[in-house]
Image (tube, helix red, strand yellow):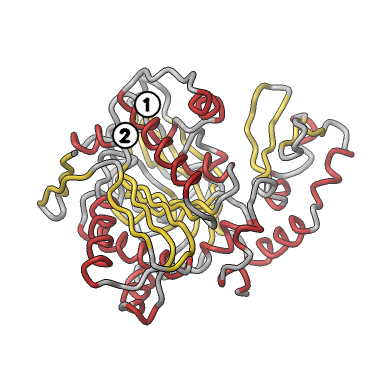
């Protein structure tokens, strides 16, 4: 058992890898929540612990299965983000192939935590029925309204549009190795939820509300069996932009050994002027690159993401992208000079940078592709739609909603 402390509650609980499991009397969806992937973010662990206790105590009718998985137990017990390696940057294709084959070296305590989480998830996938829903609970180091960060597949987008909170698309283009990117590559609905600032009571409350809404939206709970309206309104009131969708267009990456420090007072989603000073690097000013909103300004000691710039996406482009993806418009792209399929599964394009400059990133984003540079002569464009397990979700009520 691991002791996890909440500063917001001034309370300690003891948890294992599996915080809890609820199995309904009727078959249905399988929901997998993770909390505490970062050890300085205990709010998700406490929220999951509370929801499971309440469902059991009040005997709320349940359909399907709910699994609550604790993240970096080693770091959670110490209240630090991670020990040697960021657990939410280890889920790369190379590492996952090595874990699956049993050849991955477990070189740190963080890697040991990853192996245990992977084994737990793999057991659930091999034992319990689809459809599967994965939700990763987080908090931030800066003041923020609750929001979702979503890898941009139509399945993900459709399911997450049920929540009354803002949505961020495209973070997978800037980060390598998040847990949810690995899950998305398996084709499942998977996304992250940021509930508020570290160690604030509101973050625990927002996580609890999010968990209950997720259970309803996936079909595990019925609205009439608990105070659904209370939790929905709780999240809806947190933001005036509750239905807005944004895209990440820039990331400030902190280099190894760099002395980075955010200027005080920046809030998540705050509008920032072009060239406004927002941080310092080794004593020199860092200015904001263009107009827009600052996203995830870093006010903690560990991490490599200084801040992001985001901009809103017009609904017309979201509708257009859905149409283009459904008709597989991307199949004509390899007819262009300098563009070819990078693999046999035809989910990744190899693009010559000189050709890529003729098209905007937004063009490839419309078709579901996100870029990843491999060298100066090639860009890999990965498609999220190819892996989506659409058939497994066809019977879900949310799939047919407009």
Quadrant of res 346: top right
Residue 276 lies, in percent from the top left, at 43, 45
Please state if 19 lies on the left or on the right of 100 as rendered: left
Q: In front of the other: label 1 or label 2?
A: 1
Q: Is residue 80 above or below residue 161?
A: above
For marks 1 and 2, the one nearer the N-term is 1
Question: Mark 1 to mark 2: distance in Å?
Answer: 28 Å
Residue 174: image tag: none
Residue 55 lies, in percent from the top left, at 28, 67
- Whether residue 32 is visible here, answered yes or no, is yes
Q: Report helix, strand or loop for mark 2.
A: strand
Residue 111: image tag: 1
Q: Residue at x 64, y 50 (%)?
A: 388
Q: Report helix, strand or loop for mark 1.
A: helix
Residue 251 lies, in percent from the top left, at 49, 39
- Whether residue 272 is visible here, answered yes or no, is no
351 or 401, which is in the foreground? 401
Q: Residue at x 31, y 34 (%)?
A: 261
Indicate the quadrant containing the N terminus: top left, top right, bottom left or bottom right.
top left
- Mark 1: give few (<14), some (14-19) or many (20+) Cα within 10 Å: many
Residue tagged 2: 261
Indicate the quadrant containing the C terminus: top left, top right, bottom left or bottom right.
bottom right
- Mark 2: give few (<14), some (14-19) or many (20+) Cα within 10 Å: many
Residue 63 lies, in percent from the top left, at 42, 67
Instruction: Check contact, mark 1 vs mark 2: CB within 8 A.
Output: no
41 or 111, which is in the foreground? 111
Quadrant of res 238: bottom left
Q: Residue at x 40, y 71 (%)?
A: 221
């Amino acid at each position: 058992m691991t002791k996890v402390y909440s500063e917001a509650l001034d309370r300690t609980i003891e948890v294992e890898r599996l915080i809890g499991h609820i199995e309904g009397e009727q078959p249905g969806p399988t929901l997998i929540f993770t909390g505490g992937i970062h050890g300085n973010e205990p709010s998700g662990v406490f929220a999951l612990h509370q929801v499971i206790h309440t469902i059991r105590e009040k005997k709320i009718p349940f359909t399907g299965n709910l699994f609550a998985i604790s993240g970096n137990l080693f770091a959670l017990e110490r209240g630090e983000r991670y020990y040697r390696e960021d657990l939410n940057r280890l889920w790369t294709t190379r590492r996952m192939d090595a874990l699956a084959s049993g050849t991955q070296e477990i070189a740190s305590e963080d890697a040991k935590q990853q192996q245990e989480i992977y084994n737990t998830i793999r057991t659930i996938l091999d034992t319990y029925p689809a459809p599967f829903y994965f939700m990763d609970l987080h908090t931030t180091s800066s003041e923020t309204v609750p929001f979702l960060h979503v890898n941009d597949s139509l399945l993900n987008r459709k399911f997450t549009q049920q929540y009354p909170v803002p949505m961020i698309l495209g973070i997978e283009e800037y980060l390598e190795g998040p847990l949810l990117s690995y899950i998305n590559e398996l084709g499942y609905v998977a996304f992250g939820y940021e509930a508020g600032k570290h160690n604030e009571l509101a973050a625990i409350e927002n996580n609890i509300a999010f968990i209950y809404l997720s259970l309803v939206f996936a079909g595990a709970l019925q609205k009439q069996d608990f105070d659904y309206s209370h939790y929905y309104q709780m999240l809806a009131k947190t933001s005036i932009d509750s239905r807005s969708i944004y895209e990440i267009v820039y990331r400030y990456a902190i280099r190894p050994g760099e002395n980075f420090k955010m200027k005080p007072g920046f809030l998540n989603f705050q509008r920032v002027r072009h060239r406004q000073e927002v941080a310092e690097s080794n004593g020199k000013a860092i200015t904001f690159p263009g107009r827009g909103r600052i996203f995830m300004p870093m006010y903690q000691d560990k991490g490599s993401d200084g801040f992001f710039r985001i901009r809103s996406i017009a609904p017309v482009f979201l509708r257009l992208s859905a149409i283009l993806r459904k008709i597989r418009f991307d199949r004509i792209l390899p007819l262009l000079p300098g563009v070819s399929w990078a693999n046999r599964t035809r989910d990744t394009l190899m693009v010559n940078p000189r050709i890529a400059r003729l098209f905007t990133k937004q063009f490839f984003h419309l078709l579901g592709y996100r870029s990843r540079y491999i060298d100066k002569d090639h860009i890999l464009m990965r498609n999220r739609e190819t892996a989506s397990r659409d058939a497994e979700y066809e019977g879900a009520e949310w799939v047919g909603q407009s």
